[in-house]
Image: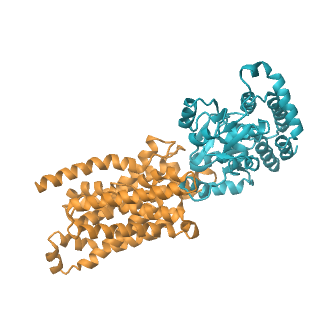
Chain colours: A cyan, B orange
């Protein structure tokens, strides 16, 4: 299934159907609406909530997204994000946008969130995704908060269908490792780990969450595929490890150009693109 | 004791190097390690030994040796037991040079730019220090100048790393201040080796000069010691050795302080002999510290400078106390 086309369909849904869906949402959410009308000026200040909000919001409902959302290195929806005013996660600028809902990550910009709450701005704090099943939960959570339950239902159904289609039969599970700056790797119990698993790979980092994988352990595990992060501009010692002769050798042997890019970072339906790309890599190994 | 000291230190260096080759996240016996290192063979073990542990061990020996040697030379020349490359800001200035070379992209352009820039930073620091404190350095002037240079270069290093577009750069301030040998490769060894060799050559004949200098400058001059030449050798030698080491492993403090201090009584307080004993002693100390950081926190990169400072800073206080008592 051409994932990019599907995503384009998701994000460039015709205005007419958006309107129809929002009307539907209005109808469905009426009992709640009486007490708690859908927010009209929503500001998102976290890369991942930015993308969820852009996927879910009604036209004109989302007022601003964070600066990172327009950075193609981190954001899978950088193009769309450019049509929104950017914020830098600072309480003052967000307050000036007069939002009736602010969506933030649960671990970032705590001071700003506390200040906004004290100023009486409703803030929704969203946990980062740790698994593929979290994608559904996040769509539901943000969709409900935006009063866009029907849109969330559509996206969830679509995500589940496409994910099921991608989880094909696998004859052999090649060993793969995620290796980022500082030798940081992701175990099975992470979003990146589940992306690997769904694409038909065995993760050499083993069960567990994010972990530092010493170079020696990486050599011992001898992964067939090494997925490294895209280097940032400027130089750093943290990323220098990706140029260590040992890492270069493994990478040269692994015949893949797959990198850990913007599709891997957030729990949105865009993870399907990461899975699809990785599944292609696996097929090439067969 | 005096006669057996050098062989004893050599033996300790050798044993600790073996221990260093056998220490790591992948459990190996020293015998297995040696076999994989020397004979090679199939599988991942030779790669681990030759590409990961060997450069780390070699760098520990080289950097420890340079720090011990330059510490002993500086102390002999300035006739001041508090002189040490890390404490008086030479390592900090070298780190600033290295950071500038990396962040301006110069180091990516040609590899030697990294050690050269660090060497330049170290050289400027040594010249400023000697200029500030004169030939017979009073402790106060030397240490105060050192504090100023450390503060200035530390701040400039932080500034450069904070300005970097790379989000990881800021967290590397710790590396440059505290030093680490984790995940270095043979290319780092080759980068540092020529400059350290040059430093070693420069230091070779300074022993006689330093010994003569204990009698005072006039007496040394009358013994045929050319003081400007001695000074030049020590300035350049220190810059080469500290610069090259800092460029690949960050600043590792207090080695050049603790080692000469511990070994001085064992060589009959003769600065010439102290040079070579301190070189081996420095290798022993850095090797031991580098094995210890891997044993204390195997999965994380505990910085070497943390350990050397934990041992060295109390020594430093003790020395300050001792010099104060002498003056009183």
Find residue B156 and report its image quarter: bottom left
- Answer yes or no: is residue B10 visible: no
The quadrant in which the N terminus of chain B is found is bottom left
- Left or right: residue A239 versus residue A168 is left
In this rendering, the answer to whether B112 lies above or below A15 is below
In this rendering, the answer to whether A249 lies above or below B297 is below
Find residue A147 and report its image quarter: top right
Taking the spot 70% from the left edge, 45% from the top edge, the residue there is A176
- Left or right: residue B130 versus residue B179 is left
The quadrant in which the C terminus of chain B is found is bottom left
Residue A264, horizontal then vertical, whole percent = 71, 43
- Left or right: residue A192 versus residue B249 is right
Please, which residue is most extreme toward the left here? B328
Residue B310, horizontal then vertical, whole percent = 34, 46
Choose between B84 and B289: the one closer to the eye: B84
- Left or right: residue B133 versus residue A168 is left
Choose between B7 and A42: the one closer to the eye: A42
Taking the spot 58% from the left edge, 35% from the top edge, the residue there is A107
In this rendering, the answer to whether A83 lies above or below B271 is above
Residue B270, horizontal then vertical, whole percent = 20, 65
In this rendering, the answer to whether B92 lies above or below A126 is below
Choose between A263 and B302: the one closer to the eye: A263
């Amino acid at each position: 299934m051409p994932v990019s086309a599907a995503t384009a369909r998701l994000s460039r849904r015709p205005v007419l159907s958006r309107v129809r869906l929002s009307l539907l949402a209005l109808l469905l959410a009426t009992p709640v609406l009486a007490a708690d009308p859908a927010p009209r000026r929503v500001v998102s200040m976290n890369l991942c909530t930015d993308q969820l909000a852009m996927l879910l919001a009604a036209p004109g409902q989302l007022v601003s997204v964070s600066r990172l959302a327009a950075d193609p290195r981190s954001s899978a929806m950088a193009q769309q994000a450019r049509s929104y005013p950017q914020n830098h996660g600072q309480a003052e600028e967000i307050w000036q946008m007069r939002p009736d809902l602010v969506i933030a990550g649960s671990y970032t910009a705590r001071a700003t969130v506390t200040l906004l709450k004290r100023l009486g701005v409703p803030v929704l704090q969203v946990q980062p995704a740790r698994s593929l099943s979290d994608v559904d939960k996040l769509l539901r959570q943000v969709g409900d908060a935006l009063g866009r339950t029907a849109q969330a239902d559509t996206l969830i159904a679509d995500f589940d269908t496409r994910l099921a289609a991608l989880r094909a039969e696998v004859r052999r599970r090649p060993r793969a490792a995620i290796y980022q700056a500082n030798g940081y790797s992701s175990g099975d119990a992470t979003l990146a780990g589940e992306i690997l698993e769904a694409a038909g790979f065995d993760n050499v980092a083993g069960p567990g969450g994010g972990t530092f994988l010493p170079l020696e352990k990486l050599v011992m595990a001898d992964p067939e595929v090494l997925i490294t992060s895209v280097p940032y501009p400027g130089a750093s010692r943290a990323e220098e490890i990706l140029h260590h002769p040992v890492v270069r050798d493994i990478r040269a042997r692994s015949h893949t150009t797959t990198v850990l890019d913007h599709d891997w970072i957030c729990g949105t339906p865009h993870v399907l693109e990461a899975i699809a790309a990785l599944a292609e890599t696996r097929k090439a190994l067969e | 004791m005096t006669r057996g000291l050098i062989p004893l230190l050599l033996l300790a260096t050798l044993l600790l190097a073996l221990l260093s080759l056998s220490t790591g996240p992948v459990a190996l016996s020293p015998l297995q390690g040696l076999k994989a290192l020397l004979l090679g063979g199939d599988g991942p073990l030779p790669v681990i030994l030759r590409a990961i542990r060997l450069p780390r061990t070699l760098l520990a020996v080289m950097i420890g040796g340079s720090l011990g040697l330059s510490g002993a030379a500086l102390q002999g020349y300035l006739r001041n037991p508090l002189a040490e490359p890390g404490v008086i800001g030479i390592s900090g200035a070298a780190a600033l040079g290295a950071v500038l070379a990396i962040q301006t992209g110069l180091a990516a352009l040609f590899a030697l730019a990294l050690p050269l820039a660090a060497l330049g930073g170290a050289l400027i620091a040594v010249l400023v220090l000697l200029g500030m404190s004169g030939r017979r350095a009073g402790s106060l002037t030397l240490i105060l100048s050192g504090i100023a240079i450390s503060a200035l270069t530390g701040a400039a290093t932080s500034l450069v790393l904070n300005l970097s577009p790379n989000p990881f750069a800021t967290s590397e301030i710790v590396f440059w201040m505290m030093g680490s040998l984790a995940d270095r490769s043979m290319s780092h060894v080759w980068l540092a080796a020529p400059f350290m060799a040059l430093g070693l050559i420069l230091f070779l004949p300074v022993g006689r000069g330093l010994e003569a200098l204990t009698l005072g400058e006039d007496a040394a001059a009358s013994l045929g010691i050319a003081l400007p030449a001695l000074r030049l050798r020590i300035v350049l030698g220190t810059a080469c050795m500290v610069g090259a080491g800092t460029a690949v492993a960050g600043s590792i403090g207090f080695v050049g302080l603790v080692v000469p201090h511990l070994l001085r009584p064992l060589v009959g307080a003769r600065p010439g002999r102290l040079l070579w004993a301190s070189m081996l002693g420095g290798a022993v100390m850095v090797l031991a510290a580098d094995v210890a950081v891997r044993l204390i926190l195997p999965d994380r990169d505990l910085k070497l400078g943390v350990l050397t400072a934990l041992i060295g800073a109390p020594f430093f206080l003790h020395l300050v106390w001792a010099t104060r008592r002498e003056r009183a």
